[in-house]
Image (tube, rainbow, N blue to C red):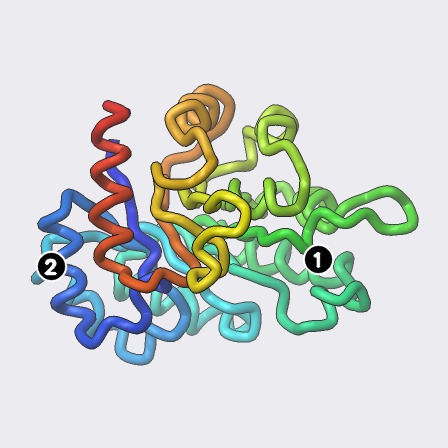
Amino acid sequence: MDFSYQLYSARNEASLDATLKTLKSLGYAQVEGWGGQFADPAALAQSLKAAGLTMPTAHMGYSQLTDTDAALKIADTVGIETVYCPAPPSEDYRNGTGNWQEFAEGLGKIAAAFKKAGKGFGYHNHHWEFSKDASGKTPMELILAASPDTQWEMDLAWVIKANEDPLVWLDRFGSRITAVHVKDIAPAGEKADEDGWADVGTGTLDWKHYIAEVKAKTQAKYFVLEHDKPSDAIRFARTSMATLKGYGV
């Protein structure tokens, strides 16, 4: 199977072109873009072609997505098949004062427009989406209930950070999950300089098991490696790919 790399992990690298070529040499076939990279979509498409990579998925922020025609034009230019909104639009949602139902309905409208244009659209979670409201519903449930067209890119490690069992959510919403972020959590007290994240295979998550479960229970086409704050983005890419190759998945 092909693994992808979330380029946000390499946001501090000096050269995107050099990074793309290195990722290709490490065995990556795909990358996932993020909103800050789309100022010149044509140049980005050329860089991907030169490196021999594709960008089937990308993250775009909610404010960027509200100009849906422009977002779709970027997707067409770069060759992106599915776009995921990576987070709620403001701190209000993170501290419990945002209107998740309204946000969910907004995502649904974007999803409908993307579907009409032949593209996929979904949402990528952190841990904020798993706190229950007065009715007992979580924001993640509200988002998926608002529109059948809204897909889910499950960031499995963030589900665990929310003290939830990802396997339960895989069972419930596997038909909506079209991509998964593959990231690892360091043992307690370790990797403080990297916000407690770890290279895949060096942390606490059994990714060989999780990948098998995702493949069995979901519609996921994309497995995207990500580290939110690596001290060395290329080390993360190299170590993680070596781990996954060792699994034989």
Q: For the point 17% across and 53% down, which residue is it? A: 23
SS of the residue under disc 2: helix
Residue type (three-letter) at the residue carrying disc 2? Lys
Q: For the point 22% across and 58% down, which residue is it? A: 234
Residue 21: which disc? 2
Which callout, 1 or 2, points at the residue further toward the start of the chain? 2
Between label 1 and label 2, give the one nearer the viewer: 2
Res 27 seen here: yes
Q: Residue furthest front?
A: 189
Is residue 37 left or right of 172 when viewed as pictured? left
Q: Quadrant of residue 95?
A: bottom right
Q: Residue furthest bottom?
A: 39
Q: How many marks?
A: 2
SS of the residue under disc 1: helix
**Residue under numbered circle 1:** 105
Rendering coords of residue 50 (x, y %): 8, 62
Rendering coords of residue 155 (x, y %): 51, 46
Q: Specify the quadrant that holds the N terminus.
A: top left
Is residue 92 left or right of 150 when viewed as pictured? right
Res 118 seen here: no
Circle 2 crowding by C-alpha within 10 Å: few under 14, some 14–19, many from 20: some
Rendering coords of residue 141 (x, y %): 72, 43
Is residue 230 left or right of 25 when viewed as pictured? right
Residue nearest the viewer, comparing 44 with 240: 240
Q: For the point 33% across and 73% down, which residue is it? A: 38
Circle 1 crowding by C-alpha within 10 Å: few under 14, some 14–19, many from 20: some
Residue nearest the viewer, comparing 193 with 217: 193
